[in-house]
Image: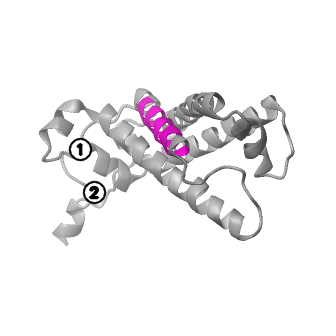
């Protein structure tokens, strides 16, 4: 049993920049496409609702987009930080019993991780966060469980995962991070 633990650099993530760059670019591009979806369906969400969360009465397209892109950037960086951790990355790069997943490569695994992350963001921010705002007397101005919001967050996550995978060079791991626990 080895006393050294694997780090993100062992997987080719380049430790300090690739995961950061992949998360940032994936987050911004994902939020651009998500924002475009919102813009087509209900532009006031971008111009009024997003700035309104911070108490800014905007009506300004530029301020709304700035807040929306900032959300995407921060959430993209959080995704990069989470996915580059040893346990998560080891799980994503481990061999599986599913032939389809094995043959598809790691890019698909990062996209799936992004979709799961987008679903988690949707569940925590607009669904739970929206209900909390309503309970304290602040109407966020958007339906918390809207299908458009779910679709947008899933789209955001898929793009985030795809662009993240373009910036990292992870190799499949022969064992899962949980194998060491069974040896003790």
Work out whether residue 59 or residue 9 is closer to the camera in this orientation and state it. Answer: 59
Query: At which x and y percent is residue 51?
Result: 78, 44
- Does residue 117 appear left or right of residue 71 in this picture? left
Q: Residue at x 35, y 47 (%)?
A: 89
- Does residue 6 appear left or right of residue 15 in this picture? left
Quadrant where the C terminus sits is bottom left
Q: Which type of secondary structure does the marked residue at label 1 adopt?
A: loop
Work out whether residue 183 or residue 61 is closer to the camera in this orientation and state it. Answer: 61
Work out whether residue 20 or residue 103 is closer to the camera in this orientation and state it. Answer: 103
Q: Residue at x 35, y 56 (%)?
A: 87
Residue that carries the numbered disc 2 in the rendered image: 177
Find residue 176 and report its image quarter.
bottom left
Q: Main secondary structure of the magenta part?
A: helix
Q: Which mark is residue 173?
A: 1
Specify few, some or many for label 2: CA neighbours under 10 Å numbering under 14, 14-19, or 20 or more: some
Work out whether residue 106 or residue 56 is closer to the camera in this orientation and state it. Answer: 56
Find residue 72 and report its image quarter.
top right
Q: Which residues fall within the magenta stretch?
A: 149-162
Specify few, some or many for label 1: CA neighbours under 10 Å numbering under 14, 14-19, or 20 or more: some
Q: Which color mode does the image show?
A: one colour
Q: Which type of secondary structure does the marked residue at label 2 adopt?
A: loop
Question: In this rendering, is residue 20 above or below 181?
Answer: above
Query: At which x and y percent is residue 142?
Result: 67, 49
Query: At which x and y percent is residue 163?
Result: 46, 29
Query: At which x and y percent is residue 25?
Result: 56, 30
């Amino acid at each position: 049993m080895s006393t050294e633990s694997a780090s993100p650099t062992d997987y080719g993530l380049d430790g300090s920049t690739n995961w950061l760059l992949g998360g940032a670019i994936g987050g911004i591009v994902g939020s651009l496409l998500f924002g475009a979806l919102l813009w087509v369906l209900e532009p006031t969400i971008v111009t009024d609702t997003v700035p309104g969360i911070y108490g800014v009465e905007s009506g300004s397209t530029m301020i709304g987009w700035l807040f929306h892109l900032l959300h995407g950037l921060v959430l993209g960086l959080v995704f990069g930080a989470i996915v580059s951790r040893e346990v998560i990355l080891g799980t994503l790069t481990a061999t599986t019993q599913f032939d389809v997943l094995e043959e598809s490569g790691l890019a698909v695994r990062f996209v799936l991780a992004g979709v799961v992350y987008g679903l988690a963001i949707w569940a925590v921010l607009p669904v739970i966060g929206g209900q909390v705002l309503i309970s304290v007397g602040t109407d966020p101005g958007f339906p918390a469980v809207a299908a458009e919001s779910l679709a947008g967050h899933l789209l955001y996550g898929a793009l985030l995962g795809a662009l993240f995978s373009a910036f990292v060079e992870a190799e499949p791991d022969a064992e899962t991070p949980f194998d060491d626990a069974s040896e003790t």
